[in-house]
Amino acid sequence: MAKVESFTLDHTAVKAPYVRLITRETGTKGDVISNFDLRLVQPNTNAIPTAGLHTIDH
């Protein structure tokens, strides 16, 4: 598994909304696994409304 770059990212410099491809790995049978960093709101300042989370869930 790849190192989680998000742990070293300066989160105060990232402004939501934000999507970033972290890594793309190829499995043993050729399957491709993509890992994304997805920020919908700024940490400790906003909350995602319940209806919005419900939409993402589906």
Image (cartoon, rainbow, N blue to C red):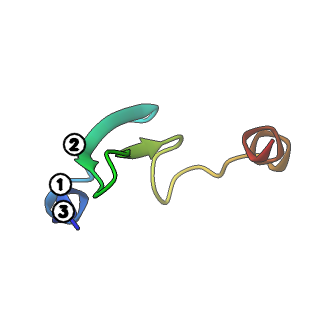
Give how far across and how far down residue 16 sits, in percent. 43, 35
- Residue at disc 2, secondary structure: loop
Give the residue at mark 1: 9
| Label 3 Cα crowd, 10 Å radius (few <14 / some 14-19 / many 20+) | few
Q: Nearer the viewer, mark 2 or mark 1?
A: 1
User: Is 17 situated above or below 32?
Assistant: above
Of the residues under marks 2 and 3, which one precedes in the sequence?
A: 3
Of residue 22 and residue 54, the one placed in the foreground of this image is 22
Q: Position of residue 30 (x, y in %)?
A: 31, 45
Q: Secondary structure at mark 3?
A: loop
C-alpha distance separating marks 2 and 3? 23 Å
Is 43 positioned to the left or the right of 58 in the image? left
Q: 10 Å neighbourhood of mark 1: few (<14), some, or many (≥20)?
A: few
Is residue 23 toward the left or the right of residue 58 in the image? Answer: left
- Residue 25 location, x and y as percent? 24, 49
Query: Which mark, residue 1?
Result: none
Q: CA distance from mark 2 to mark 1?
A: 8 Å
Pick whichever of labels 1 and 3 is earlier in the sequence: 3
Circle 2 residues within 10 Å: few <14, some 14–19, many ≥20: few
Comparing marks 1 and 3, which lies closer to the viewer?
3
CB atoms at circles 2 and 1 under 8 Å apart? yes
What residue appears at the point 65 percent right and 52 percent down from the top-left corner? 47
Residue drawn at 39 percent across, 33 percent down: 19
Q: Would you say the residues marked 1 and 3 are in contact, meaning their CB atoms lie under 8 Å apart? A: no
Residue lying at the far front in this picture: please name it.
Answer: 29
Q: Nearer the viewer, residue 11 or 5?
A: 5
Is label 1 in a helix, a strand or a loop?
loop
| Residue occupying image coordinates x 23% and y 68% | 1
The residue to which callout 3 is attached is 2
Give the amino acid at mark 1: Leu
Q: Which residue matches tag 2?
A: 13
